[in-house]
Amino acid sequence: MRQLRKMSVLLMLLVLAPAAAAADVGQVKTSKGGVVIVRDGQELAAPAGTPVQQSDRILTRADGSVGIAFRDNSLLSLGPDSSLDISLFSFGARQAADALEATLNRGTLSAVSGKIVTKSPEAMRIHTPTSILGVRGTEFFVEVTNANADR
Amino acid sequence: MIRVLGRTLALALALAVLPGCCWLWKPSGPETLVVVVPSRHDGHVGAVVVAKGEERQVLDSAYATARVKSRGHVHRTSLSAEEVQRKFAQASAALPRKSMAFTLHFVLANQTLTPESSARLDQVLAEAANWEAAEIDVVGHTDRMGTPENNDALSLKRAEHVRRLLIDKGAKPEAVTAIGMGERQPVIETADGEAEAANRRVEVIVR
């Protein structure tokens, strides 16, 4: 009986895990020109109000720019010809430490840190092809030039 | 003799030119530029730690800048406000507006909001009307009386109650989310089991 209960808990975790991973971590708040979200290999339109999820890639075209607000009030925005991967987002979860990890593959990024950084400095990290940026606060810009255009 | 000299000269020339040509041909590779700026909201200058392998550089003054190429060290420099504005104008203009937070308190051991907190619900809706795509997070918190599990449930119950009040006043149901944070995010840190009125609250965030 105990074994069965353990099994069912395990099964429940397995079923719940993908649902948790696909939870919305933020939302597109500003969107101008060509902006798409690449999710599971598909390109989705991204007007204001579009949810953003972990593992999304945000792309802007030559005429595009986009701004995202995360659940912890972190703000990230991209200028034209930019590519950003939302690698990890966890906030206020019982079983995981707070974290926001994103990768700027190319282009320009504007950022204002939110509650995750207020509570645990450097739990927000921006990865680039040549460095890792640990964010202690508050506002900063990042540009990646000469990068792989496929990303 | 002249042929040997000619050959030597050609070889020397080739050796001299070779590194130059390869240096020209080699693609320069990706480069990162990082600039810390004063916050547009309160002027505060924070810090960013730039890490490359084992190397760490802390940018913690206004317009402190680092350039990081694939090879070599992190290069410290500084950009002018005008240069930053020129480079990042479009990214900067796309940054979403700052969220607004409202804190609501309850009459003790009850689900009734204090009169001031009731009035604050209208301010929440007025703020949400200013946004193109507003989300309203209703986040319940408790103090450290009772078990963490009970406090998770209690904080969610209070948040759901406030969510219902906002919807009754006209907020779009799909835009309002109730979240229970239990005792994990106190305003004032206390020992376990301690009552603390400031921590028994619901925060409403419009973003």
Image (tube, coloured by chain):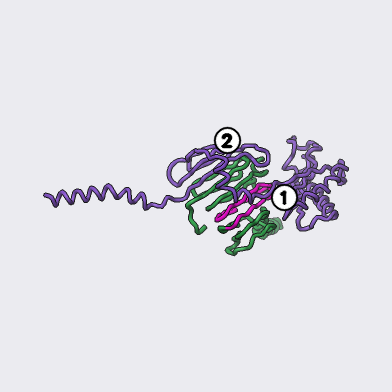
Chain colours: A green, B purple
Image: A20 above or below B104: below
Q: Chain of mark 2?
A: B
Q: Nearer the viewer, mark 1 or mark 2?
A: 2
Q: Which residues are magenta?
A: A63-92
Magenta segment's dominant SS is: strand
Q: Earlier in the sequence, mark 1 or mark 2?
A: 2
Please state which amino acid type lies under the numbered disc 2.
Ser
Of residues B37 and B174, the one drawn nearer to the viewer in this rendering: B37
Residue A122 image offset from top left, x and y in percent: 60, 41
Q: Is residue A79 magenta?
A: yes
Q: Is residue B125 magenta?
A: no
Image point (58%, 45%), residue name: B85
- Disc number at residue B207? 1
Asked if residue A3 shows in the view, the reply is no
User: Of helix, strand and loop, which one carries label 2?
Assistant: loop
User: Of helix, strand and loop, which one carries label 1?
Assistant: loop
Of residues B17 and A9, the one drawn nearer to the viewer in this rendering: B17
Instruction: Give the quadrant of residue B83.
Output: top right
Q: Chain of mark 1?
A: B
